[in-house]
Image (cartoon, rainbow, N blue to C red):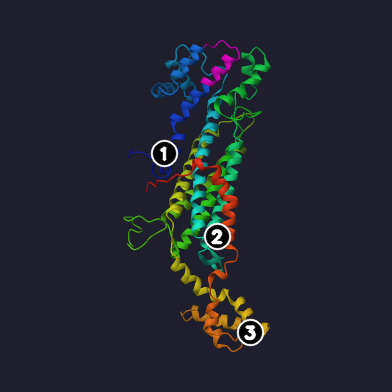
Amino acid sequence: MSTDRYSSPLSERYASKEMQYIFSQDMKFRTWRRLWIALAEIEHELGLNITQEQIDELKAHKDDINYEVAIAREKEVRHDVMSHVYAYGQQCPKAKGIIHLGATSCYVGDNTDIIVMTEALKLVRKKLVNVIAELSKFADKYKAQATLGFTHFQPAQPTTVGKRACLWLQDFTIDLEDLDYVLDNMKLLGSKGTTGTQASFLELFDGDLTKVDKLDPMLAEKMGFKGCMAVSGQTYSRKIDMKVINVLAGICSSATKMAQDIRLLQHLKEVEEPFEKSQIGSSAMAYKRNPMRSERICSLSRYVLVDTLNPAITEVSQWFERTLDDSANKRLSIPEGFLATDGVLDLCLNVVDGLVVYPKVIEKRLMSELPFMATENIMMDAVKAGGDRQELHERIRELSMEAGRNVKVEGKENNLLELIAADPAFHLSLDDLKAAMDPNKYVGCSVHQVEKFLSEVVQPILDANKDDLGVKAEINV
C-alpha cells in the first residue's frame, strides 16, 4: 500500500474485492480487447478482408495487456483508446491494421461502460438477494415477539419485532424489482460511429445497408446482451447512468431506514448489532457499544444518495451528438456509486446476520406502556361489568393523565392499573386488569402478516434465486 498519496477509502476499507475487480483496469482493458475481437469477427463474417489468422492472433493476446507500452504511448498522443490500439498492435503485428476498424473511441469506451455496469448490477443483485434472505430468517424467528410500536418515536400500539423487520424487508424487495427492470433493459451502444450515423461502416461495406444492419445484433449476441440501442449519437444516452445510480440510491435509502431503526433500538437496548470480543466502542468510554456498522451504512448511503445528482446533471449537459464533459465525472461517480453500495450491502449482511435481540428489555418497556394501550379493552370489560361507557371514558382519561404525571414528574412506575382497580366505577380487580395485560392481545394480525408476506412475496424470490444464496460478508474495519 502506498502511503505517500491519496487512496480511496472505498477500495481500502469498504468495497469487496469482487466489486473492485469489476471496476479495475484489467476488467476495462480486457473488455476493450474482447470488443475489438468481436468487431473483427463480425466484419470477417460479413465479408471484409479480415482473416481467421488475424482474429486468432488477437485472441491469443486478449488478456496479457502490455500496459507499459500503452502508458508510454499515451504520454505521446494523449489519447487512451489509440494508445491501447497501438499497444495491442505491437503484440499482434499481423492484425494491427484491422484493430478498431470503422470504430470510434466510444465503441470500446461506452460498450465497456455498459458491460461493466451490468456486471456490477449483477453483483449488487446477488448481495441484495442475500440481504433479503437474512432478513426473512430474522423476521420469521421474531414474528411473535411483541414489542412496543412507535409513531413519531412516541409509544404506540404494539407490533412484533418480526413485523417491523418486514417493513425493512419490503423496501428491499421493491429495490429488487427496480434493479431487475434496469438490468433486463441494459443494451449495448453497438457500432454507431462518430456521430451515431454508422457512416464509416456504410463505407466499409460499400453502401450495403443489410450488412450494416447486422452489425449491432451480431455484437449484442457475441457480448451476451439482448440488443443494442436503436439510435444514438456518438455515446449511449447518459440517461442510462441516471437509471443505474437511482437504483443504487434506492437500495441505500432502504438500508438507511433499517440502519437508523437499529441505531434507535440499540439506544433503547432492545437490539444490538454485532460486536466482536475485542472491539472497542469508544476511545474514552470503555463500556460503550456504539452501533458503528449501522452508522457506516447511513454514512455510505448518504454518499450514494447525493451521487444521484452527478449523472442527472451530466445527462442534461450533453450537447447534440456528444461532448466530453461527461468523461471525468463518469470515471468518478459511476464506480464510486457502485463501490459504496457494495460496502453498504456487505454491512447490511453482516449486521442482519449477527443482530442480537433482547426480549426481556423489550418486554419491560412494552409492559411499562401497555396499560395506556389497553385502556380501550379495559373500558369494554368495565361496560360488560355494568359501567357507563361515557362516564368510564372520562374517568379513564383522568386516571391516565394522573398515571402519566407519576411517570414523568415523580419518576415512578406506571400505576394506571392500580388507579383503575381502586376506582369503584370500573368494577374490576387488579387481578382482572393484569389478566388483560397479555401483549399478544394487542399486536393485531402481526404474526399472520409476517407469515403471509414471507410466504407470498419473499419465498418466491428466494426460490427463484436459490443458487445465489449463502453469501457472507467480510467487514474490513
Vertical order, 435 against 263 (above or below): below
Q: Earlier in the sequence, mark 1 or mark 2?
A: 1
Q: Which residues are magenta?
A: 37-51
3 or 1: mark nearer the eye: 3
The percent coordinates of residue 332 (x first, y second) are: 49, 38
* Residue situated in front as seen by the camera: 366 or 63: 366
Amino acid at pointer 1 = Lys
Judge the density around disc 3: few (<14), some (14-19), many (≥20) Cα neighbours within 10 Å.
Answer: few
- Residue 439, can we see it? yes
Numbered disc in front, either 2 or 3: 3
How packed mark 1 is, by other alpha carbons closer than 10 Å (few <14, some 14-19, many 20 or more), is: few
- The residue wearing badge 1 is 17
Q: Position of residue 303 (x, y in %)?
A: 49, 47
Spatial separation of the CA atoms under disc 3 and disc 1:
68 Å
Question: Mark 2, residues whose alpha carbon is within 10 Å: few (<14), some, or many (≥20)?
Answer: many
Which mark identifies residue 252? none
The amino acid type, in three-letter code, at marker 3 is Ala
Which quadrant of the rendered structure holds the N terminus?
top left
Q: Establish if 410 lies above or below 236.
A: below
Sequence-first tag of 2 and 3: 2
| In this picture, residue 61 sits left or right of residue 194 | left
| Residue drawn at 49 percent across, 38 percent down | 335
Residue 39 part of the magenta-drawn span:
yes
Rendered image quadrant of residue 324: top right
Q: Provide residue 451's location: percent of width, then percent of height.
A: 57, 57
Give the residue pinned by disc 2: 163
Mark number displayed over residue 385: 3
Dominant secondary structure, magenta: helix
